[in-house]
Amino acid sequence: MRVLLVGGGGREHALALGLQGDPEVTEIHCAPGNEGIAQLATIHALDLSDNAAIVALAQELDVDLVVVGPELPLVNGVADELRAQGFATFGPSKAAAQLEGSKNFAKEVMHDAGVATARSATCTDRVQIEKALDAFGSPYVVKDDGLAGGKGVVVTQDREVALAHALACKKVVIEEFLDGPEISLFGISDGKTIIAMEPAQDFKRAFDGDEGPNTGGMGAYSPLPWAPSDIIEQTHHDVLAPMIAEMAARGTPFVGLLYAGLSLTDHGVRVIEFNARFGDPETQVLIPRLKTPLGSLLYKAATRNLDGVRLEWKTESAVTVVLAAKGYPSDPQPVGAIATMPAISDTHVFFAGGGRILSITGMGVDLTEARDRAYRGISHIDLPGSFYRTDIAFNASVAEKGN
Ligand SMILES: Nc1ncnc2c1ncn2[C@@H]1O[C@H](COP(=O)(O)OP(=O)(O)OP(=O)(O)O)[C@@H](O)[C@H]1O
Ligand SMILES: [Mg+2]
Protein backbone atom coordinates (compact mmCIF):
# COMPACT_ATOMS: atom_id res chain seq x y z
CA MET A 1 0.00 0.00 0.00
CA ARG A 2 1.26 3.47 -0.95
CA VAL A 3 0.30 6.19 1.50
CA LEU A 4 0.34 9.98 1.25
CA LEU A 5 0.39 11.67 4.63
CA VAL A 6 -0.63 15.33 4.44
CA GLY A 7 0.96 17.57 7.07
CA GLY A 8 4.35 18.27 8.53
CA GLY A 9 4.22 18.44 12.31
CA GLY A 10 4.78 16.24 15.32
CA ARG A 11 1.52 14.44 14.70
CA GLU A 12 2.55 13.45 11.18
CA HIS A 13 5.98 12.37 12.41
CA ALA A 14 4.32 9.99 14.87
CA LEU A 15 1.87 8.76 12.22
CA ALA A 16 4.77 8.16 9.82
CA LEU A 17 6.43 6.02 12.49
CA GLY A 18 3.22 4.04 12.85
CA LEU A 19 2.89 3.59 9.08
CA GLN A 20 6.49 2.46 8.85
CA GLY A 21 5.75 -0.33 11.31
CA ASP A 22 2.96 -1.74 9.11
CA PRO A 23 4.26 -4.46 6.74
CA GLU A 24 1.39 -3.69 4.31
CA VAL A 25 2.72 -0.17 3.77
CA THR A 26 5.27 -0.19 0.97
CA GLU A 27 5.73 3.55 0.40
CA ILE A 28 5.24 6.53 2.68
CA HIS A 29 5.03 10.00 1.18
CA CYS A 30 4.61 13.08 3.33
CA ALA A 31 3.87 16.65 2.30
CA PRO A 32 5.13 19.10 3.34
CA GLY A 33 6.79 16.92 6.00
CA ASN A 34 9.77 18.05 8.02
CA GLU A 35 13.40 17.15 8.62
CA GLY A 36 12.53 14.37 11.04
CA ILE A 37 9.80 12.84 8.89
CA ALA A 38 12.31 12.76 6.02
CA GLN A 39 13.99 9.84 7.83
CA LEU A 40 10.81 7.78 7.41
CA ALA A 41 9.09 9.09 4.29
CA THR A 42 9.67 10.73 0.92
CA ILE A 43 9.04 14.44 1.42
CA HIS A 44 7.23 16.67 -1.10
CA ALA A 45 6.79 20.43 -1.03
CA LEU A 46 3.18 21.48 -0.47
CA ASP A 47 1.03 24.43 0.49
CA LEU A 48 -1.46 23.00 2.99
CA SER A 49 -4.07 25.60 2.05
CA ASP A 50 -4.04 24.52 -1.60
CA ASN A 51 -6.58 21.71 -2.02
CA ALA A 52 -5.89 21.33 -5.74
CA ALA A 53 -2.19 20.83 -5.05
CA ILE A 54 -2.97 18.11 -2.51
CA VAL A 55 -5.19 16.26 -4.99
CA ALA A 56 -2.62 16.68 -7.76
CA LEU A 57 0.11 15.21 -5.56
CA ALA A 58 -2.05 12.19 -4.68
CA GLN A 59 -2.65 11.65 -8.41
CA GLU A 60 0.99 12.06 -9.33
CA LEU A 61 2.06 9.55 -6.66
CA ASP A 62 -0.90 7.28 -7.45
CA VAL A 63 -1.33 6.41 -3.78
CA ASP A 64 -3.77 3.90 -2.30
CA LEU A 65 -4.54 5.93 0.82
CA VAL A 66 -4.39 9.60 1.77
CA VAL A 67 -4.21 10.48 5.47
CA VAL A 68 -4.95 14.14 6.15
CA GLY A 69 -3.36 15.28 9.42
CA PRO A 70 -4.10 18.97 10.11
CA GLU A 71 -7.47 20.67 10.58
CA LEU A 72 -6.94 23.42 8.00
CA PRO A 73 -7.18 21.30 4.82
CA LEU A 74 -9.98 19.24 6.40
CA VAL A 75 -12.08 22.29 7.18
CA ASN A 76 -11.24 23.50 3.64
CA GLY A 77 -12.84 20.33 2.30
CA VAL A 78 -9.81 18.55 0.85
CA ALA A 79 -11.21 15.14 1.84
CA ASP A 80 -14.28 15.73 -0.37
CA GLU A 81 -12.06 16.61 -3.33
CA LEU A 82 -9.82 13.57 -2.76
CA ARG A 83 -12.82 11.23 -2.51
CA ALA A 84 -14.33 12.74 -5.65
CA GLN A 85 -11.15 11.70 -7.46
CA GLY A 86 -11.47 8.15 -6.12
CA PHE A 87 -8.88 8.25 -3.32
CA ALA A 88 -9.46 6.28 -0.13
CA THR A 89 -9.12 9.14 2.34
CA PHE A 90 -8.72 9.13 6.11
CA GLY A 91 -10.14 12.46 7.22
CA PRO A 92 -13.61 13.96 7.48
CA SER A 93 -15.47 15.86 4.78
CA LYS A 94 -15.81 19.62 5.01
CA ALA A 95 -19.30 19.20 6.51
CA ALA A 96 -18.13 16.66 9.11
CA ALA A 97 -14.99 18.65 10.00
CA GLN A 98 -17.33 21.38 11.24
CA LEU A 99 -17.32 19.45 14.53
CA GLU A 100 -13.96 21.14 15.00
CA GLY A 101 -14.48 24.14 12.72
CA SER A 102 -17.48 25.51 14.61
CA LYS A 103 -17.95 25.18 18.37
CA ASN A 104 -21.62 26.09 17.92
CA PHE A 105 -22.12 23.34 15.34
CA ALA A 106 -20.52 20.81 17.72
CA LYS A 107 -22.95 21.91 20.46
CA GLU A 108 -25.93 21.44 18.12
CA VAL A 109 -24.85 17.95 17.12
CA MET A 110 -24.18 17.00 20.75
CA HIS A 111 -27.62 18.26 21.68
CA ASP A 112 -29.30 16.20 18.95
CA ALA A 113 -27.18 13.14 19.78
CA GLY A 114 -27.90 13.39 23.52
CA VAL A 115 -24.20 13.78 24.38
CA ALA A 116 -23.40 15.50 27.69
CA THR A 117 -21.43 18.74 27.47
CA ALA A 118 -21.17 22.08 29.27
CA ARG A 119 -24.37 24.18 29.10
CA SER A 120 -23.74 27.03 26.71
CA ALA A 121 -25.09 30.02 24.84
CA THR A 122 -24.02 31.11 21.38
CA CYS A 123 -23.88 34.90 21.15
CA THR A 124 -23.42 37.48 18.42
CA ASP A 125 -23.92 40.77 20.29
CA ARG A 126 -22.98 42.50 23.51
CA VAL A 127 -26.35 42.12 25.21
CA GLN A 128 -26.38 38.36 24.68
CA ILE A 129 -22.73 38.12 25.75
CA GLU A 130 -23.19 39.98 29.04
CA LYS A 131 -26.31 37.98 29.81
CA ALA A 132 -24.50 34.68 29.20
CA LEU A 133 -21.43 35.69 31.23
CA ASP A 134 -23.62 36.54 34.20
CA ALA A 135 -25.78 33.46 33.80
CA PHE A 136 -22.85 31.01 33.86
CA GLY A 137 -20.66 33.07 36.21
CA SER A 138 -16.98 32.79 37.04
CA PRO A 139 -14.71 31.15 35.98
CA TYR A 140 -15.84 32.41 32.59
CA VAL A 141 -15.34 30.17 29.56
CA VAL A 142 -15.40 32.08 26.27
CA LYS A 143 -14.82 30.33 22.94
CA ASP A 144 -14.50 31.80 19.49
CA ASP A 145 -16.90 29.81 17.31
CA GLY A 146 -14.39 29.30 14.51
CA LEU A 147 -10.87 27.88 14.12
CA ALA A 148 -8.43 30.15 15.92
CA GLY A 149 -5.18 28.19 15.92
CA GLY A 150 -5.35 27.42 19.64
CA LYS A 151 -6.02 31.07 20.60
CA GLY A 152 -9.80 31.00 20.52
CA VAL A 153 -10.55 29.95 24.09
CA VAL A 154 -10.23 32.09 27.20
CA VAL A 155 -10.92 30.73 30.67
CA THR A 156 -10.71 33.48 33.27
CA GLN A 157 -12.09 34.75 36.55
CA ASP A 158 -11.85 38.31 35.22
CA ARG A 159 -15.16 39.40 33.72
CA GLU A 160 -13.53 42.23 31.77
CA VAL A 161 -11.04 39.89 30.13
CA ALA A 162 -13.88 37.49 29.31
CA LEU A 163 -16.01 40.28 27.87
CA ALA A 164 -13.18 41.72 25.79
CA HIS A 165 -12.41 38.32 24.26
CA ALA A 166 -16.10 37.68 23.56
CA LEU A 167 -16.52 41.06 21.87
CA ALA A 168 -13.48 40.38 19.68
CA CYS A 169 -15.14 37.26 18.26
CA LYS A 170 -17.76 37.45 15.52
CA LYS A 171 -19.70 34.56 16.98
CA VAL A 172 -18.88 33.26 20.42
CA VAL A 173 -19.84 30.31 22.58
CA ILE A 174 -20.01 31.08 26.30
CA GLU A 175 -20.37 28.11 28.56
CA GLU A 176 -20.36 26.79 32.08
CA PHE A 177 -17.01 25.93 33.66
CA LEU A 178 -16.38 22.19 33.98
CA ASP A 179 -14.47 21.15 37.04
CA GLY A 180 -12.66 17.85 36.66
CA PRO A 181 -9.53 16.24 35.25
CA GLU A 182 -9.29 16.49 31.47
CA ILE A 183 -8.51 13.56 29.22
CA SER A 184 -8.35 13.02 25.48
CA LEU A 185 -10.02 10.00 23.95
CA PHE A 186 -9.73 9.40 20.21
CA GLY A 187 -12.08 7.38 18.04
CA ILE A 188 -11.23 6.02 14.61
CA SER A 189 -14.36 6.13 12.47
CA ASP A 190 -15.42 4.78 9.09
CA GLY A 191 -18.62 6.80 9.16
CA LYS A 192 -20.79 4.12 10.78
CA THR A 193 -18.48 2.27 13.19
CA ILE A 194 -16.13 4.06 15.57
CA ILE A 195 -13.36 2.36 17.54
CA ALA A 196 -12.14 4.05 20.71
CA MET A 197 -8.40 4.27 21.28
CA GLU A 198 -6.91 4.24 24.78
CA PRO A 199 -7.15 7.54 26.65
CA ALA A 200 -4.26 9.96 27.02
CA GLN A 201 -3.80 13.12 29.02
CA ASP A 202 -2.12 16.13 27.52
CA PHE A 203 -0.76 19.24 29.20
CA LYS A 204 -2.07 22.33 27.46
CA ARG A 205 -0.61 25.12 29.56
CA ALA A 206 2.85 26.39 28.74
CA PHE A 207 4.47 26.16 32.19
CA ASP A 208 4.82 23.84 35.18
CA GLY A 209 1.84 23.58 37.49
CA ASP A 210 -0.55 24.34 34.61
CA GLU A 211 0.48 27.99 34.58
CA GLY A 212 0.70 30.24 31.56
CA PRO A 213 -1.18 30.38 28.28
CA ASN A 214 -2.88 27.51 26.47
CA THR A 215 -0.68 25.87 23.85
CA GLY A 216 -1.01 23.10 21.27
CA GLY A 217 0.24 20.80 24.05
CA MET A 218 3.46 20.59 26.07
CA GLY A 219 3.46 16.86 26.72
CA ALA A 220 1.24 13.84 27.25
CA TYR A 221 1.12 10.33 28.65
CA SER A 222 -0.81 7.11 28.25
CA PRO A 223 -2.26 4.95 29.74
CA LEU A 224 -4.02 6.70 32.63
CA PRO A 225 -3.67 4.46 35.69
CA TRP A 226 -5.99 6.72 37.70
CA ALA A 227 -8.90 6.85 35.23
CA PRO A 228 -12.06 4.78 35.77
CA SER A 229 -11.52 1.29 34.35
CA ASP A 230 -14.59 1.56 32.11
CA ILE A 231 -13.71 4.96 30.66
CA ILE A 232 -13.15 3.62 27.13
CA GLU A 233 -16.45 1.69 26.99
CA GLN A 234 -18.32 4.53 28.65
CA THR A 235 -16.98 7.16 26.27
CA HIS A 236 -17.65 4.93 23.30
CA HIS A 237 -21.23 4.35 24.42
CA ASP A 238 -22.10 7.85 25.64
CA VAL A 239 -20.07 10.08 23.33
CA LEU A 240 -18.35 8.59 20.28
CA ALA A 241 -21.04 6.21 18.98
CA PRO A 242 -23.94 8.68 19.35
CA MET A 243 -21.93 11.40 17.58
CA ILE A 244 -21.11 9.11 14.66
CA ALA A 245 -24.76 7.97 14.43
CA GLU A 246 -26.00 11.56 14.46
CA MET A 247 -23.52 12.67 11.79
CA ALA A 248 -24.55 9.70 9.60
CA ALA A 249 -28.25 10.48 10.14
CA ARG A 250 -27.60 14.04 8.96
CA GLY A 251 -26.15 12.69 5.72
CA THR A 252 -22.65 13.90 6.64
CA PRO A 253 -20.87 10.78 7.97
CA PHE A 254 -17.67 11.41 9.90
CA VAL A 255 -14.80 9.37 8.45
CA GLY A 256 -11.51 9.95 10.22
CA LEU A 257 -10.28 10.68 13.70
CA LEU A 258 -12.80 12.08 16.16
CA TYR A 259 -10.91 13.64 19.06
CA ALA A 260 -13.00 13.95 22.21
CA GLY A 261 -11.65 16.30 24.87
CA LEU A 262 -13.42 15.26 28.06
CA SER A 263 -13.81 16.54 31.58
CA LEU A 264 -14.38 13.84 34.20
CA THR A 265 -16.67 15.80 36.50
CA ASP A 266 -18.44 14.68 39.66
CA HIS A 267 -21.61 14.54 37.58
CA GLY A 268 -20.07 12.30 34.92
CA VAL A 269 -18.15 12.62 31.68
CA ARG A 270 -18.71 15.92 29.85
CA VAL A 271 -17.40 16.85 26.41
CA ILE A 272 -15.16 19.94 26.40
CA GLU A 273 -14.55 19.90 22.67
CA PHE A 274 -14.18 17.83 19.55
CA ASN A 275 -11.37 18.00 17.07
CA ALA A 276 -11.53 16.39 13.65
CA ARG A 277 -7.96 15.08 13.66
CA PHE A 278 -5.26 13.56 15.86
CA GLY A 279 -3.77 15.83 18.56
CA ASP A 280 0.02 16.08 18.48
CA PRO A 281 1.19 15.12 21.99
CA GLU A 282 -1.44 12.41 22.41
CA THR A 283 -0.53 10.87 19.06
CA GLN A 284 3.10 10.76 20.13
CA VAL A 285 2.22 8.52 23.07
CA LEU A 286 -0.60 6.51 21.46
CA ILE A 287 1.09 5.50 18.20
CA PRO A 288 4.21 4.04 19.90
CA ARG A 289 1.84 2.00 22.14
CA LEU A 290 -0.41 0.76 19.33
CA LYS A 291 0.26 -2.80 18.15
CA THR A 292 -2.43 -2.87 15.45
CA PRO A 293 -0.80 -2.04 12.09
CA LEU A 294 -1.67 1.61 11.44
CA GLY A 295 -1.82 1.77 7.64
CA SER A 296 -4.29 -1.10 7.34
CA LEU A 297 -6.38 0.34 10.17
CA LEU A 298 -6.68 3.78 8.58
CA TYR A 299 -7.34 2.16 5.18
CA LYS A 300 -10.21 0.15 6.67
CA ALA A 301 -11.65 3.34 8.15
CA ALA A 302 -11.29 5.16 4.82
CA THR A 303 -13.07 2.33 2.98
CA ARG A 304 -15.93 1.84 5.50
CA ASN A 305 -14.61 -1.49 6.71
CA LEU A 306 -14.04 -1.12 10.46
CA ASP A 307 -16.80 -3.47 11.54
CA GLY A 308 -15.33 -6.13 13.86
CA VAL A 309 -11.88 -4.52 14.10
CA ARG A 310 -10.32 -4.48 17.57
CA LEU A 311 -7.27 -2.49 18.58
CA GLU A 312 -4.30 -4.14 20.25
CA TRP A 313 -2.05 -2.23 22.61
CA LYS A 314 1.36 -2.77 24.12
CA THR A 315 1.33 -2.95 27.90
CA GLU A 316 4.14 -0.38 28.02
CA SER A 317 3.52 3.18 29.14
CA ALA A 318 4.56 6.23 27.13
CA VAL A 319 5.37 9.78 28.18
CA THR A 320 6.17 12.58 25.77
CA VAL A 321 7.78 15.92 26.63
CA VAL A 322 7.75 18.85 24.21
CA LEU A 323 10.76 21.10 23.73
CA ALA A 324 9.47 24.51 22.67
CA ALA A 325 11.08 27.77 21.62
CA LYS A 326 11.14 30.52 24.25
CA GLY A 327 8.15 32.78 23.78
CA TYR A 328 5.93 29.94 22.54
CA PRO A 329 2.98 30.09 22.00
CA SER A 330 2.51 33.82 21.46
CA ASP A 331 5.90 34.82 20.11
CA PRO A 332 8.34 31.91 19.59
CA GLN A 333 11.92 33.10 19.18
CA PRO A 334 14.29 31.59 16.64
CA VAL A 335 16.47 28.86 18.15
CA GLY A 336 19.87 27.56 17.19
CA ALA A 337 20.55 24.22 15.59
CA ILE A 338 20.62 21.03 17.63
CA ALA A 339 24.25 19.96 17.76
CA THR A 340 23.84 16.24 18.24
CA MET A 341 20.89 14.02 18.90
CA PRO A 342 22.15 11.18 21.06
CA ALA A 343 20.40 7.88 20.41
CA ILE A 344 18.76 6.85 23.66
CA SER A 345 17.15 3.45 23.86
CA ASP A 346 13.40 3.21 24.37
CA THR A 347 12.75 6.75 23.20
CA HIS A 348 11.37 8.27 20.02
CA VAL A 349 12.10 11.78 18.81
CA PHE A 350 9.39 13.62 16.89
CA PHE A 351 10.08 16.86 15.06
CA ALA A 352 7.40 19.50 15.22
CA GLY A 353 8.11 22.78 13.53
CA GLY A 354 6.45 26.04 14.51
CA GLY A 355 7.01 27.04 18.12
CA ARG A 356 7.25 23.46 19.28
CA ILE A 357 10.59 22.19 18.12
CA LEU A 358 10.46 18.51 18.93
CA SER A 359 9.24 16.08 21.50
CA ILE A 360 10.76 13.02 23.06
CA THR A 361 8.60 10.05 23.89
CA GLY A 362 9.96 7.64 26.48
CA MET A 363 8.62 4.09 26.70
CA GLY A 364 8.79 1.98 29.85
CA VAL A 365 7.18 -0.72 31.95
CA ASP A 366 5.33 2.01 33.82
CA LEU A 367 4.92 5.79 33.66
CA THR A 368 7.83 6.32 36.05
CA GLU A 369 10.26 4.53 33.75
CA ALA A 370 8.78 6.09 30.61
CA ARG A 371 9.01 9.52 32.18
CA ASP A 372 12.63 9.01 33.28
CA ARG A 373 13.58 8.04 29.74
CA ALA A 374 11.77 10.99 28.15
CA TYR A 375 13.45 13.44 30.53
CA ARG A 376 16.85 11.75 30.17
CA GLY A 377 16.44 12.21 26.42
CA ILE A 378 15.51 15.84 26.66
CA SER A 379 18.33 16.61 29.10
CA HIS A 380 20.79 15.50 26.41
CA ILE A 381 19.62 18.20 24.03
CA ASP A 382 21.48 21.42 24.39
CA LEU A 383 19.45 24.03 22.60
CA PRO A 384 19.75 27.64 23.75
CA GLY A 385 16.44 29.50 23.61
CA SER A 386 14.30 26.46 24.32
CA PHE A 387 12.24 25.35 27.30
CA TYR A 388 10.14 22.41 28.45
CA ARG A 389 7.83 21.55 31.32
CA THR A 390 9.36 19.44 34.08
CA ASP A 391 6.11 18.05 35.49
CA ILE A 392 4.67 16.06 32.58
CA ALA A 393 3.05 12.87 33.96
CA PHE A 394 4.57 13.52 37.38
CA ASN A 395 1.35 13.25 39.42
CA ALA A 396 0.23 10.19 37.49
CA SER A 397 3.58 8.49 38.02
CA VAL A 398 3.31 9.11 41.76
CA ALA A 399 -0.30 7.86 41.80
CA GLU A 400 0.62 4.67 39.93
CA LYS A 401 3.02 3.75 42.75
CA GLY A 402 0.09 3.77 45.15
CA ASN A 403 -1.87 1.28 43.05
N1 LIG B 1 -16.20 24.40 29.87
C1 LIG B 1 -14.92 24.40 30.24
N2 LIG B 1 -14.61 24.31 31.54
C2 LIG B 1 -13.33 24.33 31.96
N3 LIG B 1 -12.27 24.44 31.14
C3 LIG B 1 -12.52 24.53 29.80
C4 LIG B 1 -13.85 24.50 29.29
N4 LIG B 1 -13.78 24.60 27.95
C5 LIG B 1 -12.46 24.69 27.63
N5 LIG B 1 -11.70 24.65 28.75
C6 LIG B 1 -10.23 24.70 28.81
O1 LIG B 1 -9.72 25.37 27.68
C7 LIG B 1 -8.96 24.48 26.86
C8 LIG B 1 -9.19 24.81 25.41
O2 LIG B 1 -10.56 24.66 25.10
P1 LIG B 1 -11.00 23.91 23.77
O3 LIG B 1 -10.41 22.56 23.82
O4 LIG B 1 -12.46 24.02 23.61
O5 LIG B 1 -10.29 24.87 22.71
P2 LIG B 1 -9.48 24.63 21.37
O6 LIG B 1 -8.85 25.93 21.08
O7 LIG B 1 -10.36 24.05 20.35
O8 LIG B 1 -8.37 23.58 21.82
P3 LIG B 1 -7.49 22.57 20.92
O9 LIG B 1 -6.33 23.38 20.47
O10 LIG B 1 -7.11 21.49 21.90
O11 LIG B 1 -8.35 22.08 19.81
C9 LIG B 1 -9.43 23.09 27.27
O12 LIG B 1 -8.47 22.12 27.06
C10 LIG B 1 -9.71 23.29 28.75
O13 LIG B 1 -8.53 23.22 29.51
MG1 LIG C 1 -10.24 22.31 19.23
Image (cartoon, rainbow, N blue to C red):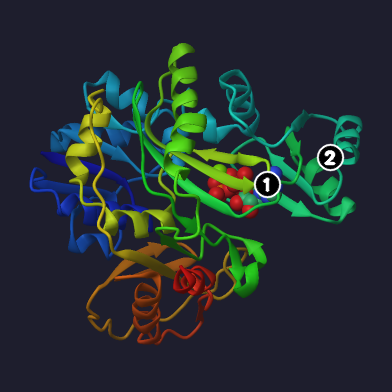
Q: Position of residue 20 (x, y in %)?
A: 16, 54
Name which residue lies at 49% across and 49% down: 184
Residue 113 disc label: none
Q: Could you tell me the amino acid type at mark 2?
A: Phe
Judging depth in this view, the residue of 370 and 4 nearest the camera is 370
- 362 relative position to 103: left or right: left
As drawn, 124 above or below 31: above
Query: Badges 2 and 1: C-beta atoms under 8 Å apart?
Result: no
Q: Position of residue 386 (x, y in %)?
A: 49, 79
* Residue 170 can be seen in this image: no
Name which residue lies at 29% across and 64% down: 316
Residue 136 disc label: 2
Name which residue lies at 70% across and 51% down: 179
Judging depth in this view, the residue of 20 and 34 nearest the camera is 20
Query: Residue 233, located in which quarter of the rendered image?
Result: top left
Q: Position of residue 201 (x, y in %)?
A: 49, 57
Q: In the rendered structure, which disc, 2 or 1, sits on the residue that comes first in sequence?
A: 2
Query: Residue 210, located in which quarter of the rendered image?
Result: bottom right
